[in-house]
Amino acid sequence: MTIRVSEAEKSVMDVLWQESPLSSVEVVEKLQSQEWSEKTVKTFLNRLVKKGVVSFEKDGRRYLYSPAIEREEFLADESEGFLDKVFKGNMKELLATFVENKQLSQNELDYLKGLLDDNKSDKESGNVE
Amino acid sequence: MTIRVSEAEKSVMDVLWQESPLSSVEVVEKLQSQEWSEKTVKTFLNRLVKKGVVSFEKDGRRYLYSPAIEREEFLADESEGFLDKVFKGNMKELLATFVENKQLSQNELDYLKGLLDDNKSDKESGNVE
DNA sequence: AACTTTGGATTACATTTGTAATCAATTAAC
DNA sequence: GTTAATTGATTACAAATGTAATCCAAAGTT
């Protein structure tokens, strides 16, 4: 069973990944666009701590929160789950959907090509890992 | 607000996208691997109908269910949501995560390159849409 | 010192989801 | 025709999630 982080909680994680440690007040400020009451944000922080994906250190009366997991690792997990659940593991179809539906910019296309070339040369040289 | 289809419900949609129309019994059979009671699957079918993403026609005492939305459209919606929620719309990062983490096979890499070439020639010829 | 404010902890409550069981009507079987 | 099986409809109920409000202790204010 993987760590479960809800949508709303993910928004909080994003804030902490951008900058940390942050006090709850600071997190609330960075989430103003969401129009959540500070009580709500505090609930999310609490739940994230309980889930073990956010840690805190005391600073007087208040807590300073930090992510307890790496963003990259989290994104990889989420991506894998998405691939499995929505595309039943069919990577080709997933890629096709993104490439075809999202109207990639030339810039993004070039970037992706670069990624593929790197990946390919890695494979050719046996330089995996 | 987009149509909300839960994980379990998605499994049912997958079955119907593979083949339809199907009776509830047939859907249950195709979902045996999930180990859900037939009552549970019926609940999902009901909820999907209420959500308007599955339709049915009567066949005597029973119903024959069919998807009421296109799989491609659904995948595109889900993909867009995933991109926005998890990667905050950063397509480059999403692509990088998939390409780098998933250890694409040579076959998948070639396929993806093909997609990119098609996409590029479309763009160059102004042949978009 | 008493009062107010602040900030984490606890509690609340509706909705969604997972997971069924029960009810009711219809059909199939004796 | 009465009974049993089938199948959709309704109801159930706990856990997760969205969204806060209330409680309580420590710190700041007068």
Image: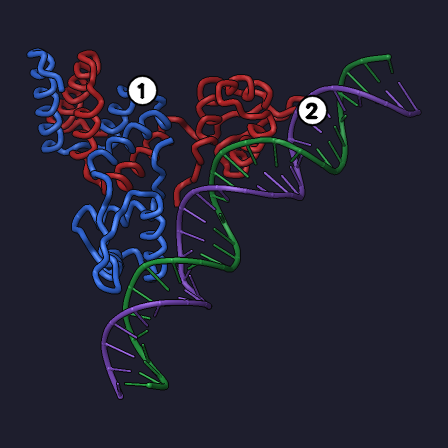
Chain colours: A red, B blue, C purple, D green
Mark 1 chain: B
Q: Which dot marks residue B90?
A: 1
* Residue drawn at 18 percent across, 27 percent down: A127
Tell me where residue D12 appears, x and y as whole percent: 51, 60
Cβ–Cβ under 8 Å for marks 2 and 1: no
Q: Please state if B5 lies on the left or on the right of D20 as rendered.
A: left
Tell me where residue D23 appears, x and y as whole percent: 74, 38
**Residue closest to the eye, A108 or B47:** B47
Amino acid under disc 1: Asn
Q: CA distance from mark 2 to mark 1?
A: 37 Å
**Residue closest to the eye, B54 or A71:** B54
Q: Nearer the viewer, mark 2 or mark 1?
A: 1
The number of discs equals: 2
In the rendered image, which quarter contains the N terminus of chain B?
top left
SS state under label 2: loop
Q: Please state if A111 lies on the left or on the right of D23 as rendered.
A: left
Residue wearing tag 2: A61
Q: Residues within 10 Å of mark 2 (few under 14, many from 20)?
A: few
Amino acid under disc 2: Arg
Q: Please state if A19 lies on the left or on the right of B109 as rendered.
A: right
Tell me where residue D1 appears, x and y as whole percent: 33, 85
* Residue drawn at 35 percent across, 32 percent down: B2
* Residue drawn at 23 percent across, 57 percent down: B58
- When asked about the image quadrant of residue B79, the answer is top left
Tell me where residue B107 appears, x and y as whole percent: 9, 33
- When asked about the image quadrant of residue B7, the answer is top left
Q: Is residue B32 visible from the viewing direction of this image?
A: no
Mark 2 chain: A
